[in-house]
Each structure stands twice: as structure tokens, then as C-alpha cells.
Image (spheres, rainbow, N blue to C red):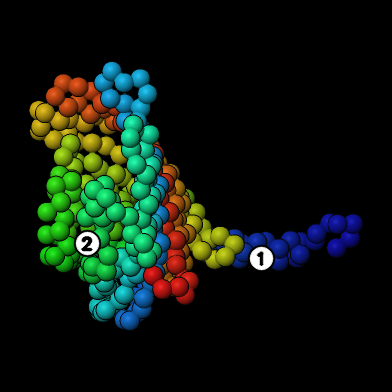
Amino acid sequence: MRGGIVGPAARHVLTVLLVALGTGAAAHAEATLRYKFKAGDETRYVLTQSLTTEVTLPQQEKPVTTGMTQSMYFKNVVDEVTSTGSARLRQTYTRIKLSVRSSAAGAQSFDYDSAAEEQPTGPIAESILKSIKPLLNAEIQQTISPRGEISDVIVPQSLLDAFKSNPALAAMGNTFSAEGFKNLSAQSAVSFPDKPLAVGDAWDQAIDLKLPFGKLTTTKTMRYGGKDEHGLEKLGISTTMTMEPAANPQVSMKLTKGQGAGAILFDPLRGRVHSSTLKQTMEAEIMVAGQKIQQKSETEVALQLDEGTATR
């Protein structure tokens, strides 16, 4: 090799190397993502949701803005792993934090931490805590397949009875039923295709939620983005929301905007979600007794693996 010119033999060797490297890169770019379970394993997460809602009532110039931040600490304990690799696990909420602010005239702020010694009091606190406290330490059983499919959800009857006795929660349709909890679990999880993924591959996951206004369908589109510098698998998320109105002449809801975007980091070695983020915007027109109410909400949801040693 002289003057930077590569001879035929050297070119042949380089060609073989490049083909080999290219083939290796292509093979490395494909990944089969699966959850991994072991009986007795315990995994802890923190799910934080920030919600800002603007509601404009008829003949009202300025909207009423309400802000809510909620953090839910929970653990998943694997009781059994089946021959197909699916896990029968118990999900328990061990700590709940909630903060609420509103611009409505006379509205009071609210701060709650189930781990705090001093608890809020008063009629507003009593109403809110009636919705929160039944969740604490209740064990919700479910089966999760290696692909992340959720089935056989069992909610303690005492928890379902507590929700039914709360008029505000009972009015939310099947949100606080066994099917509702299955949908809530699916929102914070991700299911994988049954084939290897190449960078750029995409797949959909639809979640239905029955509300008094109708059926809200959220379609999540996941796109595989390869590994990051730490070896975690990257997934991009985009969401679209549609509303199928309920047959209710008194109350109707028209969804004018519903979309979002986020990302997931999945740990392939440990077989579990490391973290995820999602931001969504929803705008709707609600008709109540002939009066139009405009509502806009922005939601940020973050799921983070909690590997701290503090008691939750």
C-alpha cells in the first residue's frame, strides 16, 4: 500500500470486514423485548402525574384553572411464574402524595402525604381522602405475560365497595372496577410484539376507558429506537385520543383535541421498565342542559424505578 492507495487484496479484506461489520450491526439492531420474572422478586416504582385543567363556563371570561400533582409509590411482588413465563403478581400502593391548587374563588389548597404524621382535616380533606385511603396497602392481583399483556385482574371486594360508596367515584363509570384497574395498569406498562424489533419498527396499543360521557379510546404508538449509551432499549411514544359519545341527552362530550408524546427506557437484562415519560393534551366541549363548557387539560406522567432503601 503506497501513497494511500489500497491494493486489490487489501480491498478484498476490507470488503469482507465491512460486510461482516454491517451484518453484525444489522443483527445487533434487532431486539426481542421481553419482561423477565422470578418468584419472590419485588420491584418498586414511583408514578407521578401532574394535571392542569382549565374550565371555561358559560358567560365566564376567565377560565378556572386547577392544578394537581400526585405521586403514587407502589411495589410489584411476583408470587408465581408459570411455565409460559407469565407472572402472577401482587401490586400494592405503599405511599400516596397529593397536592391540589385552584384559581376558583374561595378554593382551598390541599396537600396530603400518607407517610406524614400530621394529616389534613376538614370537609374537603375528608372528601378527597375518602377516594385515596382505600388504595393504600390494598393488594391488586394480576397476571403479566413476558410480552407485557395484562390479564386476570383481581381487586379486593372491600376496595370496590369503598369506591362504590363514594358518589364521585361511582359516577366515573368503570374506572374504578377490575376492568378499570386493568386499563390503568396498561397505561403505565407497555406490551411488545411477538417478533424481533429493528430500529424504526412501530406497533400500536389501544386502551378503552368508559366514562359518563362515553368511551375514551387512547391509542399508543410505540417506535423502537435502539439502545442508549447505558444499554437500555429506547421506545418513542405518540398517543391519540378519540371519544365515542354515550347515549345521554343531558350530558355530552365532544373531544376536539387529544394527543401526546413521550419515551420509555426498558432494561433488557433485568427485563423491566426502567422509566417512562408522557405528556398529553386534551381539549373538549361538554354540553350540560344546553350549556357549553370548554375544558382543556395538560397531563404529564412519569414512571421511575425506585431503587432507594427508604421504607415506602
Any mark on residue 134, and which? Answer: 2
Tell me the element at label 2.
helix
Percent from the top left, x then y, of residue 271? 41, 70
Mark 1, other Cα within 10 Å: few <14 / some 14–19 / many ≥20: few
Q: State the quadrant of the N terminus.
A: bottom right
Percent from the top left, x then y, of residue 143? 24, 69
Q: Amino acid at mark 2?
A: Pro
Mark 2, other Cα within 10 Å: few <14 / some 14–19 / many ≥20: some
Q: Residue furthest top?
A: 59
Tell me the element at label 1.
helix
Relative horizontal placement of residue 41, taking residue 151 as reference (left or right): right
Q: Disc 1 marks which residue?
A: 17
Residue at the image position 47 percent from the left and 75 percent from the top: 309
Relative horizontal placement of residue 199, taking residue 296 as reference (left or right): right
Q: Earlier in the sequence, mark 1 or mark 2?
A: 1
Closest to the observer, 292 or 77: 292
Closest to the observer, 298 or 133: 133
Q: State the quadrant of the C terminus.
A: bottom left
**Quarter of image, res 117:** bottom left
Q: Amino acid at mark 1?
A: Leu
Marks 1 and 2, how far apart in space? 63 Å
Percent from the top left, x then y, of residue 254? 24, 29
Residue at the image position 31 percent from the left and 45 percent from the top: 219
Q: Nearer the viewer, mark 1 or mark 2?
A: 2
Where 50 falls versus 135 (above or below)?
above
**Quarter of image, res 115:** bottom left
Relative horizontal placement of residue 90, taking residue 68 as reference (left or right): left
Percent from the top left, x then y, of residue 277? 44, 52
